[in-house]
Amino acid sequence: MSEVQQAAAAQSAEPILVISHLAKKFGSFQALKDVNLAVRAGEVLGLIGPNGSGKTTCINVVTGLYRPDGGKIEYRGHAIGRQRPDELARLGVNRTFQVPKPFKSLTVRQNVEVAARYGGADLGRADVQELLEFLELDQRAEHSAAELTSAQQKMLDLARALATRPKLLCVDELGAGLNPEELSQVATRLRQLAGSGLALLVVEHLMDFVDQVTDRLIVLSAGKDIFSGLLAEAAQDPQVVEVFLGTADGH
Ligand SMILES: Nc1ncnc2c1ncn2[C@@H]1O[C@H](COP(=O)(O)OP(=O)(O)O)[C@@H](O)[C@H]1O
Ligand SMILES: [Mg+2]
């Protein structure tokens, strides 16, 4: 093994996020019953499952929007689950939203700057510029976020999350609504981020995108993980097939 390969192997051996027996209730409704997963540095873990299976709730709990009702979340060896989203962002945990909500009255650049401050990241103007270029938003930098297309708003949401310099990034249906060219661009970007050592938890229902982006995946069904492995294996798993065929839209 070359030094570079050794460094990569060492990096990929470090678990960034370990979730065990995670549970979350809304009133009497148990949205998460028993979720178990682990993501390593440099790895992209896909999280798929039908609509309502708890994918977004899982991200919401990991990133501090909701408190868990049971189970354990460990981030870089420390229990989390009681911290606020801004505290977690400062520790290196951030996310994108299924429906992005940028500050529409601010420019694209200002949105990224505000996010960096929120996450306590020391981003200079050159860093912000680099981030905007990475996500092809540099031409729109001085425009208000309200002027962006929905695909660009998704890229801005990703830029805002990256502006906090996360070590764990949760991505919620970033691909939805993008055209094939935009999808392939985003897929490349996410792989690049993983290549730089980020751990990614990617919720997505577009299977080609999942195939392109993820190293491995977890299938959720009614708040429980029912499968862990490769997409090709998932497609052969009777329980997984039933869960997807049993729903009207397969999301
Ligand atoms: N804040 C909430 N209050 C009440 N129920 C919720 C809330 N958030 C999610 N749920 C419910 O939890 C279940 C899982 O939702 P969600 O995590 O959004 O699913 P997914 O992202 O897999 O489509 C759904 O039945 C949803 O209606
Ligand atoms: Mg969702």
Image (cartoon, rainbow, N blue to C red):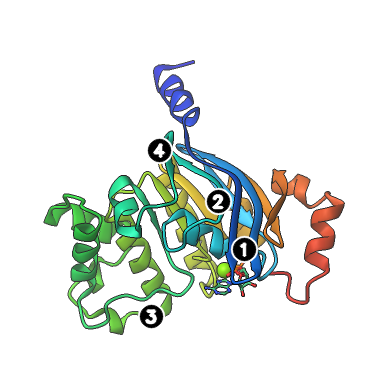
Q: Residue furthest left?
A: 125
Q: Amino acid at mark 3?
A: Thr
Q: Residue furthest front?
A: 28
User: Residue 148: where, in percent of width, then height?
Assistant: 33, 79
Q: Amino acid at mark 2?
A: Val
Of the four image quadrants, the one with ligand 1 is bottom right
Give the CA separation, mark 4 to mark 1: 27 Å
Q: Is residue 142 above or below residue 184?
A: below
Q: Amino acid at mark 4?
A: Gly
Residue denoted by label 2: 213
**Could you tell whether 51 is left or right of 120 in the image?**
right
Label 2 SS: helix
Q: Could you classify mark 4 by the number of other residues whose Cα lies within 10 Å: few (under 14), some (14-19), or many (20 or more)?
A: some
Residue denoted by label 3: 149
Q: Does the residue at mark 1 contact the one at mark 2 (Cβ under 8 Å)?
A: no
Which numbered mark, 1 or 2, is in the foreground of this view? 1
Residue at image location 27% in from the left, 56% down from the top: 163
Residue at image location 84% in from the left, 54% down from the top: 239
Give the CA separation, mark 4 to mark 3: 30 Å
Residue denoted by label 4: 197
Q: Could you classify mark 3 by the number of other residues whose Cα lies within 10 Å: few (under 14), some (14-19), or many (20 or more)?
A: few
Which numbered mark, 2 or 4, is in the foreground of this view? 4
Residue at image location 65% in from the left, 64% down from the top: 30
Q: Earlier in the sequence, mark 4 or mark 1?
A: 1
Quarter in which the C terminus is drawn: bottom right
Give the CA separation, mark 1 to mark 3: 28 Å
Q: Could you classify mark 2 by the number of other residues whose Cα lies within 10 Å: few (under 14), some (14-19), or many (20 or more)?
A: many
Q: Does the residue at mark 2 contact the one at mark 4 (Cβ under 8 Å)?
A: no
**Could you tell whether 246 is left or right of 70 in the image?**
right
User: Residue 170: where, in percent of width, then height?
Assistant: 46, 55
The residue carrying mark 4 has its beta carbon less than 8 Å from ligand 2: no
Which numbered mark, 4 or 1, is in the foreground of this view? 1
